Image: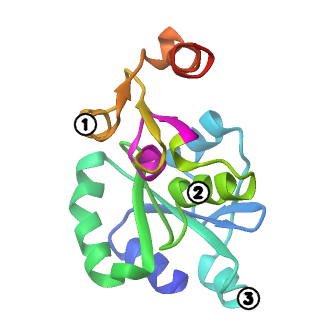
Amino acid sequence: MATKIVRDVACRGIYAQIYLKDRVVTPQLNDWSREYERISSVRIEQADLSILLSQEPEGVEKILLMAKESDLDQFAPRLRELYGEKVHLTKSKPCFLEMTDCQVNKGVALAALAERFGIAREDVMAIGDSFNDLEMIKYAGIGVAMGNARSEIKEQADLVTASNEEDGVAEAIERYVLN
């Protein structure tokens, strides 16, 4: 399926990179890839994705699409129509649209960790600021949105704390965990 998704995205001229085991690969290095390398401190390789995916079709962990937010917002419904329940779509930044297996998101991961350590859901606090944090915020007994979060995230959270710039995580921990 990753091969088809990458092909569909390329036809629309949207930049894509794939996460393949411990590698991040794109068909073309450009301003998007350089910006991602800068903000994430990850090295991105350039390779022919059709060849790479034919060799390792099952190894793709994530496909990240990068474009103007309005372009991604227009394209996302088409992706949902084409791939429906097979993929999980979310934004981690306004210009980053992430695609993973339908069972992969931060809420699922947090639930698995809580279960592994025997922590009841109501005793879990999750803090986030973007769409990729939404499932985690909704899962937690206390879902906290950062002050700089988009309004859609704040509306889903139980509480809103200060922004990233104002030590919002520390504020939430001090107020709701240590107090």
Residue 125: within the magenta? Answer: yes
Image spot of residue 47 (x, y percent): 68, 70
* Residue range corresponding to the magenta coloring: 123-137
Q: Nearer the viewer, residue 110 or 94?
A: 110
Question: Do we see residue 164 in this rendering?
Answer: yes
Image spot of residue 169 (x, y percent): 55, 21
Residue marked by disc 1:
155
Under mark 3, the amino acid is Gln
Q: State the mark number for residue 111.
A: 2
Residue marked by disc 3:
55
In 3D space, how far apart are the residues under numbered discs 3 and 1 (Cα atoms)? 44 Å
Q: Which quadrant of the structure image shows residue 123? A: top right
**Given this view, does label 2 or label 1 mark the residue nearer the observer?**
2
Q: Earlier in the sequence, mark 2 or mark 1?
A: 2
**What residue is at 33 percent from the left and 80 percent from the top?**
84
- Image quadrant occupied by the C terminus: top right
**Mark 2: secondary structure:** helix
**Mark 3: secondary structure:** helix
Q: Nearer the viewer, residue 15 or 41?
A: 41
Residue 19 is left or right of residue 158, and the answer is right
Q: Which quadrant of the structure image shows residue 52? A: bottom right
Residue 167: within the magenta? Answer: no
Image spot of residue 91 (x, y percent): 40, 51
Q: Mark 3–mark 2 contact, CB under 8 Å?
A: no
